[in-house]
Image: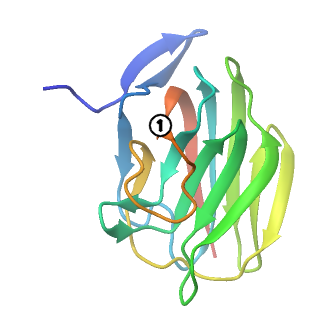
C-alpha cells in the first residue's frame, strides 16, 4: 500500500505540501470552485520537474468538474466544462518556471476567465457556468477528458498558500 496524500514539508522556513509526481493529490469538497458564481483560485507552486503535469484535475472517474489546469510544454493550459457547450480549452503563453516558487491564479467572472503567472495575465471571453457540482482535486492522475496534455504526469512539486475566493 502506498499513500496518495501529499506530505507536509518545511522549506524556506515555511510549510508546504510535497507532491511526489507519482499520483499524490489533495481533494477539497464539492463547490470549492463554485459552479454558478464568480471565483478566484490562487496558489504558489514550485515545480520540481518540467514535464507535462496536472495541477487541477477537471474530472474524477466519469464525473466531470468544471475547471482543469495543466502544465504543458512549460506553459499554463486550462480547460473549462461549461453548461450547454463542449469543453473550452485555453492555451496560454504564460511560462511557468521550474525549480523556483511562482504564483498561479485563475479567476472567472460572468464574462471572462483569466489565467495568471507571477502577475502576468491572459484573459479569454467566456460566459458559461460550470457544468457540474464537483469536488476540487489538486494533483493526481488525468483520468479522461478533453484538453488534457499528451503524456501528462501527476504534479511533481511543492504547493503552498492555496486560496479560493467566491464572488457574487
| Position in image of residue 101 (x %, y %) | 69, 23
| Position in image of residue 158 (x %, y %) | 53, 25
Residue appearing at x 64%, y 76% in the figure: 168
Quadrant location of residue 138? top left
| Position in image of residue 18 (x %, y %) | 45, 23
Q: Which residue lies furthest to the bottom in this view?
A: 84
48 and 10: which one is in front? Answer: 48
> For this view, does 86 lie left or right of residue 106?
left
35 and 78: which one is in front? Answer: 78
Residue appearing at x 54%, y 73% in the figure: 81
Residue appearing at x 70%, y 19% in the figure: 100
Residue appearing at x 59%, y 31% in the figure: 51
Vertical relation: 23 (above or below) 158: below
Task: Kindly state the secondary structure of the residue where label 1 is placed.
Answer: strand
Q: Which colour scheme is used?
A: rainbow
Vertical relation: 93 (above or below) 159: below
- Name the residue tied to disc 1: 153
| Position in image of residue 69 (x %, y %) | 59, 52
Amino acid at each position: 500500500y502506498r499513500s496518495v496524500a501529499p506530505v507536509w514539508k518545511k522549506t524556506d522556513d515555511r510549510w508546504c505540501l510535497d507532491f511526489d509526481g507519482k499520483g499524490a493529490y489533495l481533494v477539497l469538497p464539492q463547490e470549492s470552485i463554485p459552479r454558478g458564481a464568480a471565483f478566484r483560485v490562487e496558489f504558489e507552486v514550485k515545480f520540481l520537474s518540467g514535464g507535462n503535469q496536472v495541477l487541477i484535475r477537471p474530472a474524477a472517474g466519469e464525473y466531470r468538474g468544471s475547471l482543469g489546469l495543466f502544465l504543458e510544454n512549460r506553459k499554463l493550459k486550462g480547460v473549462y466544462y461549461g453548461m450547454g457547450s463542449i469543453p473550452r480549452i485555453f492555451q496560454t503563453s504564460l511560462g511557468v518556471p521550474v525549480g523556483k516558487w511562482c504564483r498561479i491564479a485563475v479567476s472567472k467572472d460572468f464574462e471572462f476567465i483569466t489565467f495568471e503567472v507571477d502577475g502576468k495575465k491572459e484573459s479569454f471571453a467566456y460566459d458559461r457556468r460550470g457544468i457540474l457540482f464537483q469536488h476540487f482535486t489538486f494533483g493526481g492522475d488525468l483520468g479522461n477528458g478533453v484538453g488534457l496534455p499528451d503524456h501528462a504526469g501527476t504534479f511533481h512539486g511543492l504547493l503552498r498558500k492555496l486560496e479560493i475566493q467566491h464572488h457574487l
